Amino acid sequence: MQLTYLVLLGAAIAGSYIFANKNNLGKVAQQAAIWGMIFVGTIAAIGLWNDISRDIAPRQAVSGTDIVLPRAPDGHYYITLDINDVPVDFVVDTGATQVVLTQQDAQNVGLDPDNLRYLGIARTANGEVRTASVVLDQVSVGPYTDARLRATVNGGEMDQSLLGMTYLGLYDSISITDGELILSR
């Protein structure tokens, strides 16, 4: 019913515009063609948005035995690790000692944040927070898989999980070259 109404309304508006400009039908056709191209261009941009966003904000890549992370527009480096076969996004944080999961990411990988024992304390830029020690069964990125990796779950609010030095220390080399962080084993 609403579609019928919109079609009739559109036809009435288009008809009145054409009638009002019957002496300039060439110009009306030109304007209709321009609006048609704008409409098609918008639909194409929406359909290709995932491809466009990948080109604008490139993601991690595997080059041989290297994991290559491009610097994001905000100046940080981000990586996606598969934890227990679930992709989890991390910000690389050399100032963090451990791998720190948000409560949501912990839940996504099969941990129950409500039943963890928050016995640890972490001192962060936002003050002290309670933490719970956990062991992640399997952590994978590119050609590398690590088993039984120790991590913590943050008991407070956190925007994104942090990839700290306990994981980064598994690599033989960490370098930053031309805006890319390169992890090598």
Image: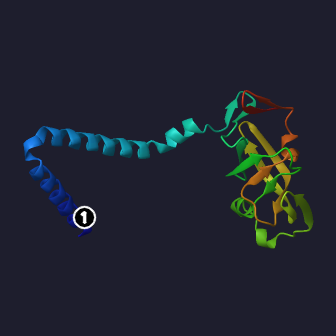
Q: Residue at x 86, y 39 (%)?
A: 170
Task: Give the quadrant of residue 169.
Answer: top right
Residue closest to the eye, 114 or 29: 29
How is this picture coloured?
rainbow
Is residue 132 something that shows in the picture? no
Q: Residue at x 69, y 32 (%)?
A: 62
Q: Which residue is mark 1?
A: 3
User: What x and y, as percent, mark residue 153?
Assistant: 81, 61
Residue closest to the eye, 8 or 132: 8
User: What x and y, as percent, mark residue 98?
Assistant: 87, 51
Residue closest to the eye, 125 or 77: 125
User: What x and y, as percent, mark residue 42?
Assistant: 37, 45
Residue closest to the eye, 124 or 165: 124
Q: Residue at x 87, y 70 (%)?
A: 117
User: What x and y, as percent, mark residue 130?
Assistant: 87, 66
The amino acid at mark 1 is Leu
Left or right of 58 on screen, residue 124: right
Left or right of 4 on screen, residue 38: right
SS category of the residue bearing label 1: helix
The crowding category of the residue bearing disc 1, from other C-alpha atoms within 10 Å (few below 14, some 14 to 19, many at least 20), is: few
Where is the C terminus found, in terms of image quarters? top right
Spot the residue most to the bottom. Answer: 114
Query: Is residue 142 placed above or below 90 in the rendered structure?
Result: above
Is residue 8 something that shows in the picture? yes
Task: Give the quadrant of residue 165.
Answer: top right
